[in-house]
Amino acid sequence: MKPNYKNWMPKGMIWSFAAATTVCLTLSFIIGLSWLKIILLVLAFILALVTLWTVLMYRAFSYDGKRQMSRQIIDGVADLVHLPDGGKGLDVGCGSGALTIAVAKRNPNAFMTGIDRWGAEYASFSKRLCEDNALAERVAYRTSFAKGDALKLNFPDGTFDAVTSNYVYHNIPSRDRQAILLETLRVLRKGGTFAIHDIFSREKYGNMQAFVNRLKDMGYERVELIPTDSGRFMSSWEARWMALKGSAIIAGKK
Ligand SMILES: C[S@@+](CC[C@H](N)C(=O)[O-])C[C@H]1O[C@@H](n2cnc3c(N)ncnc32)[C@H](O)[C@@H]1O
């Protein structure tokens, strides 16, 4: 049995844009020459471009394709998560379980928990899929998956020896994403480590350098922001066309 980590670009989204393009084109052919026809043609053109963009994203992310960007990112983040023997780690927004499992494989004497909202926007991800992938990767006995919300984690303070997450918080509608990071760090024990990858642009997160300084003032150690959008996980050009500019890992010790 092979794991199936699916794709960060939901197939449903690609089909929706393709369907909307077709509808606009069809209507523009039915309607006689008018402003409406021109508007529909322009709309069809824009939607066709968006469809093409989603297809290219899907290909770049695919675990089977040539680029395999998702695999590269998951491996790169997992390499930074170190758990002590008998330790416990948390992956917030685990999706199909890729990062939870990658960390479990690198830390053979530790236990990983993955939580996710598993909402309609990522319909192909599920708890069942995570569990099947953990079985396929032979780490089912050292992993568990549960429904949960990054905004309010269902764990007491200091539960975990390490916390991680990949491309989750920028998806969450919030005026204060730094508060979401603090909620994740709440469940990390003193002395535990963290590695969180996301799009830490100013528009999405505000001033991240100030956040790094704030963590240091709170007693956190070795806190750093490691850019991943200029060679580490993707080229600057890829980061721009894939709307991933600002991608970085925030890592450190509590
Ligand atoms: C781009 S996917 C990344 C999945 C996984 N981290 C990975 O690297 O493969 C984003 C994930 O964030 C999850 N998510 C979005 N909002 C969430 C929330 N409030 N709490 C927990 N998970 C959430 C989605 O369900 C989805 O699985």
Image (cartoon, rainbow, N blue to C red):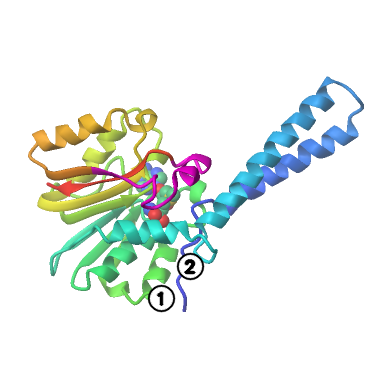
Q: Which residue is located at x 25 percent, y 51 percent?
A: 195
* Residue 85: % across, % down: 13, 69
Give the mark nearest the N terminus, 1 or 2. Answer: 2
Residue 98 sits inside the magenta stretch: no
Is residue 137 shown above or below 154?
A: below
* Residue 251: % across, % down: 22, 48
Query: In the rendered structure, are the residues bearing label 1 and label 2 in contact, judged by CB atoms less than 8 Å apart?
Result: yes
* Residue 84: % across, % down: 13, 65
Q: For the magenta stretch, what is the residue range?
A: 225-244
Can you see residue 96?
no
Question: Where does label 1 land, which residue?
Answer: 136
Query: Which residue is at the front of the view, 32 or 52?
Result: 52
Q: Secondary structure at mark 2?
A: loop
Mark 2 Cα shell of 10 Å, populated few (<14), some (14-19), many (≥20) = some
Q: Secondary structure at mark 1?
A: helix
Q: Which residue is located at x 23 percent, y 53 percent?
A: 163
Answer with the quarter of the image where residue 30 lies.
top right
Residue 233 sits inside the magenta stretch: yes
Is residue 109 shown above or below 16?
A: below
Image-based side of 223 in relation to 246, left or right: left
* Residue 244: % across, % down: 44, 42
In this view, the residue farthest toward the top is 35
Q: Which numbered circle lies on residue 4?
A: 2
Query: Which residue is at the front of the view, 31 or 44?
Result: 44
Query: Mark 2 belongs to which amino acid?
Result: Asn
Q: Which residue is located at x 9 percent, y 33 percent?
A: 217
Can you see residue 4?
yes
What is the CA distance from the residue labelled 1 to the residue labelled 2? 9 Å
Is residue 165 shown above or below 108?
A: above
Query: Mark 1 belongs to which amino acid?
Result: Ala
In this view, the residue farthest toward the right is 32
